Image: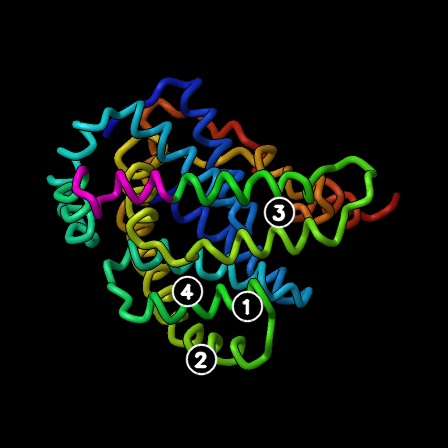
Amino acid sequence: MISLNPTITQIAQRKIAFFASSHLSNDLYFLKEFIDLMINVVGEEELIALLKKDDGTNSKRNNEIAKNWNKPNGIKKTLKKFDKLIEQTKSVYDLIEDKSLKKKEKSDYSKLTSKAKKISVIKPDIYSLFVFLVNCTSLNRMTIPQEYYKILEHRGNKPIQGFDKKRVISSETPNI
Amino acid sequence: MKLVNEILNKRLELYNEFELTHDYIKAIWHFYSVYNMCLVITGIEDKHTNKKNMLIRNLIGNFNSYSYSKLQSYMQKDYAVINSALQILSELKEESDFYGDYDLPDMIAISEYD
């Protein structure tokens, strides 16, 4: 297992939190950012060697990724193509998710959907690389701090944190 | 697999929430993100990837009940993959006894409130 520097761990955890709590291609943007970061941290050649050695339940897919890494249909080219599509959608997504009180145009929403529909949601190869990178590093045994998920609260969704234990306890205690 | 398990649970929670609020496109997006990770955990290969991707693209562009009902028939089968992945993760959790984090010999108490 590769142990990560605390600063890198924190950055990686934030990216994963954003990935887990957003949607419509914004999540894929953070997924791609995480993969890029980890490839640079682990090292491309070492990652290929680790993928080749993998003998888990998903070993077949991981070994194929390692084999075809630099080939025209390999994961490296796929990630580059993926990057272009995601950057186009991300810019439109940011316009809509802008927290200022500026009125959002209806055309912005249709722009987002027209860009997002170009992205295929089911991509086992990229997710395979993501899961492998999480599992081969010290991130594997960690959890993501709850405050990293707060991106959702600011955007009007229910907080994921669950119920407030202090409030529940105080309501259960009888009034004296 | 502890972190992967956490991501899966968060996304399933969001899927459930968006489905309840009738935001079907976001719900589908979260569902298939979970499904992607479950395919990796179980090592299963999906032969209908292209068909499903096409249906999802159609729905994002123009939501219609015909494509949605077709996709729902796939989703019902895909639940089995998600279920088996969650089972694998829970077995791993039992085997490694909470991933070995809480039984460190020098540990006196758990510092977090939760």
* Residue A120 percent location from the top left of the image: 42, 57
User: Residue B104, which numbered label?
Assistant: none
Q: In this view, does A117 lie to the left or right of B77?
A: right
Callouts 4 and 3 in the same chain: no
**Residue type, numbered disc 2:** Ser
Question: Residue at label 4?
Answer: B53
**Residue type, numbered disc 4:** Asn
Question: Residue at label 2?
Answer: B73
> Sequence order check: which comes first, mark 4 or mark 1?
4
Q: Residue at x 87, y 46 (%)?
A: A175
Subunit bearing disc 2? B
In whole angstroms, how far apart are the C-alphas of marks 4 and 3?
28 Å
Subunit bearing disc 4? B
Q: Is residue B105 left or right of residue A119?
A: left
> As displayed, is residue A30 above or below residue A163?
above
Q: Are marks 4 and 2 in contact (CB under 8 Å)?
A: no
Quadrant where the N terminus of chain A sits is top left
| The one of B63 and B30 positioned closer to us in this rendering | B63
> Sequence order check: which comes first, mark 2 or mark 1?
1
Q: Are marks 1 and 3 in contact (CB under 8 Å)?
A: no
User: Residue B59, which numbered label?
Assistant: 1
Q: Residue at x 19, y 45 (%)?
A: A65
> Sequence order check: which comes first, mark 4 or mark 2?
4
Subunit bearing disc 3? A
Callouts 1 and 3 in the same chain: no
Question: Residue at label 3?
Answer: A160
Callouts 4 and 1 in the same chain: yes
